[in-house]
Amino acid sequence: MRVEVAARTALRFEDGTPVRAASGVVEYDTGWLVVQDDATHACLLTTPTAAGTPLRLLPPVDGHDSFDEAAGTKHLKPDLEAACAVGPGALILGSGSTPARMRGVLLARPEAEPLTADLSGLYARIGAALAVDPEQLNLEGACRVGTALRWFHRGRPAAGLPSAAIDVPLAALLAAVHGDLDPTAVPLSVPQLLDLGDGLAVTDAVTLDAHTVLVSAALEDSPDAYDDGAVLASALAILVDGRLTDRVLLPELDGRVAKVEGLAVRSTDSTDPTGVRLLATVDADDVDLPSWALDLRLRL
């Protein structure tokens, strides 16, 4: 597998403010929806190179719409990390580890108001299934595999807490978001532990075909699921039926590791099925720096 950064764009809103902490990206309406993990609103792009417009996902939390450690509001942030296309809309999910991070947001269709749900009961069951303490839960990526949503726990492999994947029936999860099913009643598969090597942990995922999932991964020197740390490496990896078959390190940008946290397929090469074009978002873990959108060309 080979990867090339064909182009990159600093993500900004139309008023010039940076898109912060781009933790997920999903095709939405006629463009792309970029999720910020430290804000209540996302960025709606008509193209990956154009300035975006804000789209509210959650109401303000204690009067705040953005959150950071310096302002003393990090504990309030929703930490929306996983974004997955659902019909004409999108499902966006928090990472866990605090009650504020255990919510789901459903954009059923572009003209609809966001529907939010407290899924703490489901998160608690996932933590128990993974044998992970609640404060260490860190669900950072998701993709559709058949009729299920495959949800990826990042973990901290370097500290002995491996990445893992768990399947959730999408219909049941959506019923829980709509309030038609108790979140504690959503079925779960047996978790599958993942070893990407060299301490790399899953940060997002996208489906390539019925058996193949592409994941982004990072090696981060972080003490827990709550605090950020120095990112030492970033990679893409291929999982076929959950088994690692290939991996490639991502090139640095301006001498810094590109911590890819969002992945979406832009197109495949009709003349060459091994060619995939991706839209990736990079979280700089710095509220003053705009996130990057990367045009990645992948050769499988």
Image: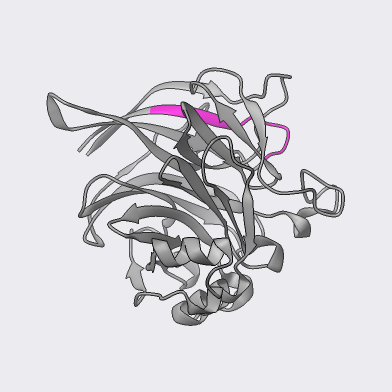
Toward which corner of the image does residue 147 lie, by quadrant? Answer: bottom left
Residue, x 56% and y 56% (percent of image)?
Answer: 221
Q: Which residues are magenta?
A: 286-295
Q: Is residue 73 magenta?
A: no
Vertical order, 285 against 104 (above or below): above
Q: Position of residue 158 (x, y in %)?
A: 46, 65
The picture quadrant where one finds residue 250 is top left
Quadrant (top left/top right/bottom left/bottom right) for the N terminus: top left
Quadrant of the image containing the C terminus: top left
Q: Is residue 97 left or right of residue 144?
A: right
Residue at 68% over, 55% down: 78
Residue 288 is one of the magenta-drawn residues: yes
Q: State the image quarter where residue 171 is shown.
A: bottom left
Residue 262 visible to an observer of this rendering: yes
Q: Nearer the viewer, residue 190 or 294?
A: 190
In the foreground, 59 or 208? 59
Q: What percent of the width, then of the height, locates residue 75? A: 76, 60
Q: Residue at x 60, y 52 (%)?
A: 80
Q: Is residue 53 above or below residue 71?
A: above
Q: Position of residue 108 (x, y in %)?
A: 52, 46
| Above or below, 160 relative to 6 | below
Camera-side residue of 80 and 135: 80
Determine the main secondary structure of the stretch shown in magenta. Answer: loop
Q: Residue 216: tell me if it is visible.
A: no
Scheme of image coloration: one colour
Q: Residue at x 40, y 44 (%)?
A: 87
Residue 57 relative to residue 160: left or right: right
Q: From the viewer's perspective, is 247 left or right of 60?
A: left
Q: Position of residue 240 (x, y in %)?
A: 21, 56
Could you tell me how many numbered marks the image carries? 0
